[in-house]
Structure formats: structure tokens, C-alpha cells
Amino acid sequence: MSSFLIDPSEMKQFLVRPRLDDQEGIMFAYAAPAEVLAKLLPPPLKLVAPMVCGYVVQMGKPSFGGPYLESVLYVLANYRDKVVGAYPFNLMLHGPGAETGIISGREGAGIPKKMADHMEIRRNDQQATAIVERHGVRLLEVTWTAGTPNDPQTAQQVFSQLKLNSQVEQASLFYKYQMDQAADGTNVFHDAALVSTQQSVITDRLEPGSLRVKVASSEDDPYGELKVIKPLGAAWYHVASSVMHNTIKLEDADADKIMPYLVSGRYDRGIINPNVTTFII
């Protein structure tokens, strides 16, 4: 029976080794301005390549709630020549399990997640499209067409990291932090740290193809800043299992210096400008 007081024994199962099994959708990569990407990476992270990667997928079987759609735009970043991992600028979620996915990811691992107003993935034989919309703007639109990628060599380098039907260890890089209200009413950030999450992933299907991609910005979500110079390729793929099994603290961070890099991926403009509002009838 539901209660605001649960059995303490159940706490042992709280977000234990979260799984995201049965993922299916479009993964993609495109060339973007190196100087822009480098500027948006918080130090000490360094850009590995002038390329934005992403996906729009259905998370079919999360272990912590209902299914949902998820998208991401990220770059590969290098941490002091010790760790290379995905550094996401933002993830959008939509669907029945989206709220739980946002709360567990943002609070648990510092992942920059928001709720989309609308997302969809549609496949018709050898072509698929995916869109992400929020606050009246279509932020992301991708089209995959089965066949040869736009840039076969670069696309193959991206796809080869998956190693079909084999367990692959992947790392992602996030910043965690705490926020409290001070005596003067302001909210301050503290205890910031760079962490690396480790996932074990098994991909069991991948169909390469070409990519068409569009990005656009709203005041709250600056996707257009990640300008498309050249599509590199896309694939329709399926992840059989993905387990986040560890989060490692890499180093402490200066919250005052790091937070300007993090706010837009996690919050909207209204949180720093009280004059910003929206009325919808």
C-alpha cells in the first residue's frame, strides 16, 4: 500500500545499479565549430574532436520507472589525459517515466536533464526521423536514411566504439554540486565536483546511414549554439542492456567558476531573471 512512510528495508533497493535496457532509436554525429565547443567545455576538460554526437531513443525498460523518450547532445572530452568520456550539454526527456528519469539522473549523478514538451521518433522502412520540441521551438530534428554515412570514415570511428554484441565500458563526465539559500536570501552553490559515471553497455543492432540534422535555439535552450558544419552520419540502433554501475569523483571544483557552464543545461532563464514568464491558455 502506498504511504509517505515506506519500510526501511526497501531503501536497500533505492536506485541500485540503474539499468536502461531496450533502447532503440537514432544515434548521430556532426562536425561543429571547434572554438565554440572548446569555449563551452568547463576546465580542466579539453575537447577531443570538433564533433557533436547525440541520440534520440526510446528507453524501453528502465529499472527505476516507466519508459520514456530521451535525447542528448554531447562532445567527447579529455580529463587530464586520464579519462575520455561523453560530456553532455543537455538531455531532454519526455513520456511516462521522464520525471523519474530526470530526478534520478540530475540528483543522483549531476546529469543536465530537462523535460521536453514534445518528442517523437518515427521509422518507416529505411528512413527515420526524430524531433525534440520545447517552449514553442523545434530544438532538434534528425533524419536517418539507411545506407552510406555522409562521412564514412569518421562515422565508422564513432560506430566502432559500440562493438556489437559485446559488453563495452563507457564513461560520462558530469559536475555535481549543492545549492543552499544564504541569510540574505540569495542562493549559493557549493561543494562542486567533477565526476565520471561508468556504464556497461551491450549494443545488439546497428544500421548505418546518412544524416540530416537541424538545431535551433530558444531563450532557455541554446541548441543552435552547437552549429552544424557538416553531417557525419547516423545509425538506427538498439541497446540490449546498459547498467550504470559506478560514479567516481575525479576532483573538487570551484562552484563560482564552474556554475556559469552548467546553468543553461539544467535550468531556464526565469531562474536568473524574474521578469521572464510564459502564459499558455
Image (spheres, rainbow, N blue to C red):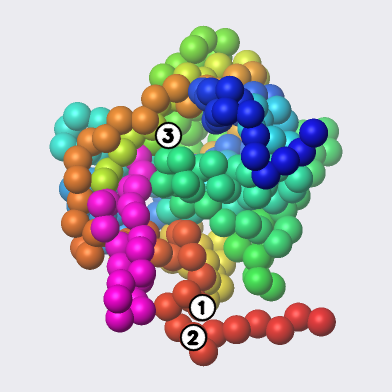
Q: Give residue 251's position: percent from left, percent from top.
A: 19, 40
Name which residue lies at 30% across and 81% down: 184
Q: Which of marks 2 and 3 is in front?
A: 2
Seen in the picture, residue 121 relative to 131 is either above or below; the reply is above
Mark 1, residue position: 270
Q: Mark 1: which secondary structure?
A: helix
Q: Of 251 and 16, which appears nearest the observer?
A: 16
Q: Which residue is drawn at 16% across and 37% down?
A: 80
Disc 2 marks a residue whose amino acid type is: Pro
Q: Is residue 188 magenta?
A: yes
Side of 172 relative to 222 (left or right): left
Q: Position of residue 147 (x, y in %)?
A: 65, 31
Task: Indicate left or right for 59 with 49 as reference.
Answer: right
Q: Are the residues tagged 1 and 3 within 8 Å (C-beta)?
A: no
The residue singled out by tag 2 in the image is: 274
If you read the primary sequence from the N terminus, does the residue marked by circle 2 or circle 3 appear first? 3
Marks 1 and 2 in Cβ contact (< 8 Å): yes
- The image position of residue 111, as x and y in percent, is 45, 46
The correct choice, above or below, for 186 with respect to 94 in the image is below
- Marks 2/3 in contact by CB < 8 Å: the verdict is no
Label 2: which secondary element:
loop
- Residue 155 can be seen in this image: yes
- The label number, if any, that marks residue 154 in the structure image: 3
Magenta span has 258?
A: no
**Residue that sits furthest to the top in the current view:** 166
At x 80%, y 33%, the residue is 1
Q: Is the magenta stretch mostly helix, strand or loop?
A: strand
Q: Which amino acid does the dot numbered 1 rest on?
A: Gly
Rounded to the nearest angstrom, the CA distance separating label 1 from label 3 is 39 Å
Residue at horizontal 57 percent and vertical 10 percent from the top: 165
For the record, the magenta segment spans 173-192
